[in-house]
Image: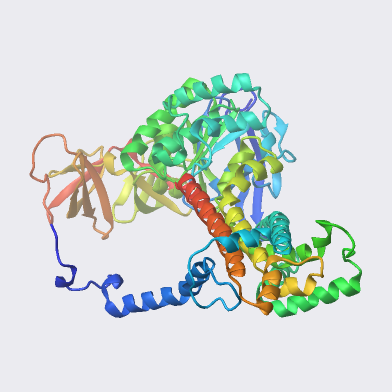
Amino acid sequence: MFRRGNREPIGPLEYARRLHLRLLFFVTLVFLYAPIVVLVIFSFNDSRRGGNVIWRGFTTDYYVKAFNNESLMEAFANSLTIAFVCTLVSVVLGALTAVMLWRFRFPFKAGFEGAVALPIVIPEICMGVAMMVFFARSGISVPPDWGYPWNLGNITIAHIAFSFPFVAMVVRARLANFNRELEESAKDLGATEWQVFRDILIPHMRPGLVAGGLLAFTLSLDDFVITFFTSGPDTVTFPVKVYSMVRFSVTPEVNAASTVLILITLVLTALAIWLQNREKKETRQ
Amino acid sequence: MTDLQGRRAGQPVIAIDTVTKRFGGSVTAVDRVSLEIAPGEFFALLGPSGCGKTTLLRMIAGFESPTDGRILIDGQDMSHVSPNKRPINMVFQSYAVFPHMTVAKNVAYGLKVTGVPQSEIAGRVEEALELVHLGGYGARKPDQLSGGQRQRVALARALVKRPKVLLLDEPLSALDAKLREAMQLELVRLQESVGITFIIVTHDQSEALSMANRIAVMERGSVRQLASPADLYENPANRFVADFIGKVNLFEARVASRDNGSLVLHVQGLGEVRLPQGMGAAEAGRADLALAVRPEKLRLERERPSPERLGFEGQVQQVAYYGETSSVFLTDQAGHSIAVSIQNEGRSTQPMVTVGERVWCSWAPEDTLLLAD
């Protein structure tokens, strides 16, 4: 039976039927996504010269051009390498930190917990300067003449430093609702501490590890400020490269490269959400 | 061996030797408990919440270590043996079925981690699942099972290890009433068929009475009485046990006189009561005596009962109808409320007594309990 929705009085929880809320929702969407949509559209713009603001027809030339731009591709490869290593190390380090904070009691635990969370709240610019000074003065620094991928060491270390606290936070939250009887029951069945960790605790943490890993990956991939202070002339990452290209002119090539990046991020996020939903279905009791 | 507590001769499978557990130096959860449990027993630790029964069970399993005293399993001191090395298994209150593993993998887990050969595992898992009537459920995930089925998985997972002792922590508390009753019978059947010693922790007296061979009633960290179910009910050692197991009418009493071998008590609300020959010889010296009668041992009559029965006249205050039984609440001369339980044998829908009526309440002298402490 078809019924005109507006005939019935609006219920207290039917927010979707209130005009001003619909309007607010619409405006929010526009502000969030209009710039991205414009970016994607103008990556197909057939503009000959700089000043990529007027639509001149559809082309995919700039994708080809972007893929043929060697320095852009090198920056892209650098970014992916850094993000990959940073994700791996951050997940391991973050998970271990979370387990330690959840499992053990030790002196100055509260202080340690605060210190771990510090990189999340410190302004990035401060982190960047601090990292630069640290690498310059401490001597703990990868020599600039080392080849790929070792020359990315400084940036990778800096990225791990600000990524792993996010992983620790996410995993810690997941551990909070772990049923300790699962652990005891595994031990009761004959499992050693290591077997309990491998067979019971890690499967429980997995959604947190996936979410934390994804967070670390995207944080690392699009970081500009900290990277800017720790990169050298031979170790340019994608965001830094885009910045230098934009300083000359905003060409559709930049748009095309950015669109590819957005696509990668979207696919990864969708994958992570799908993985987490599957886990949730499994762990529901 | 001594047979003070009605246990069988031979080496006990579990010996708890003056075990004390204190938490944080001040809270004493278990206070100098000594118990011996024989092979093949169905043993219950019964008590209200906070009495230390779960702490005692966790010490047997190895998740807590005693502050004082020792626990021996099969004559071996367990003080420095970690939980994963003990020849016992436990069914947890939340069942703790691993949510990311199938039923078969759950049951196989304990065998896998202890290095039982692959070839042997499949057969033993199948056998264990059959034992708990879950044959054919091996490929399911725990979230596809009901609460009762998950508990069976937990049982199979523990039994597949062929432990010397199976510990069960409040195993029936999460099930609904009908299922709980079925599981009580099921657990007894299971225990008889596998012949493993079961130790169950429960706060539900009917659970303990119906399943266990022997029950330790605990209160504030100590064992108040250790006896068979019938013995606990008919011969409670003290007021706490009498009150905790079943219902009981208590009357404060003191010794009035002795009359060639039988004790005459002055009972509040009843007057002088002469006990049968020999009863209360041990308790006579105590100051805080109480006379107790179970509600179902009382009989209601309109006429004065025969003189060999003990009794009093009271007024009916309330009648509660339960179907198979009714409870009649009387007040005696002193104003105490006394409960009388009556079997509803006939099909009469009329109450046998009416509120406000004066009736005689009586019991056989040998049904009297004399409690000190």
Please, is residue B147 above or below residue B268 in the view? above
Residue at 54% x, 67% y: name it: A43
The quadrant of the image that shows the N terminus of chain A is: bottom left
How many callouts does the rendering have? 0
From the viewer's perspective, tell me whether residue B267 is left or right of residue A194. Answer: left
* Residue A139 or residue B87, whichever sits in front: A139
Residue A70 position within the rendered picture, expressed as x and y whole percent measured from the top left: 73, 60
Q: Is residue B279 visible?
A: no
Q: Can residue A220 be seen in this view?
A: yes
Residue B209 position within the rendered picture, expressed as x and y whole percent measured from the top left: 41, 36
* Residue A104 or residue B173, whichever sits in front: A104
Residue at 71% x, 37% y: name it: B78
Residue B53 position within the rendered picture, expressed as x and y whole percent measured from the top left: 54, 46
Q: Which residue reaches farthest front?
A: A48
* Residue B99 or residue B166, whichever sits in front: B99
Please, is residue A91 above or below residue B34 in the view? below
* Residue A275 or residue B50, whichever sits in front: A275
From the viewer's perspective, tell me whether residue B266 is left or right of residue A12. Answer: right
Please, is residue B371 above or below residue A129 in the view? above
Residue A165 position within the rendered picture, expressed as x and y whole percent measured from the top left: 68, 65
Q: In which image quadrant can residue A141 be found? A: bottom right
From the viewer's perspective, tell me whether residue A74 is left or right of residue B125. Answer: right
Snapshot colouring = rainbow
Residue at 67% x, 34% y: name it: B86
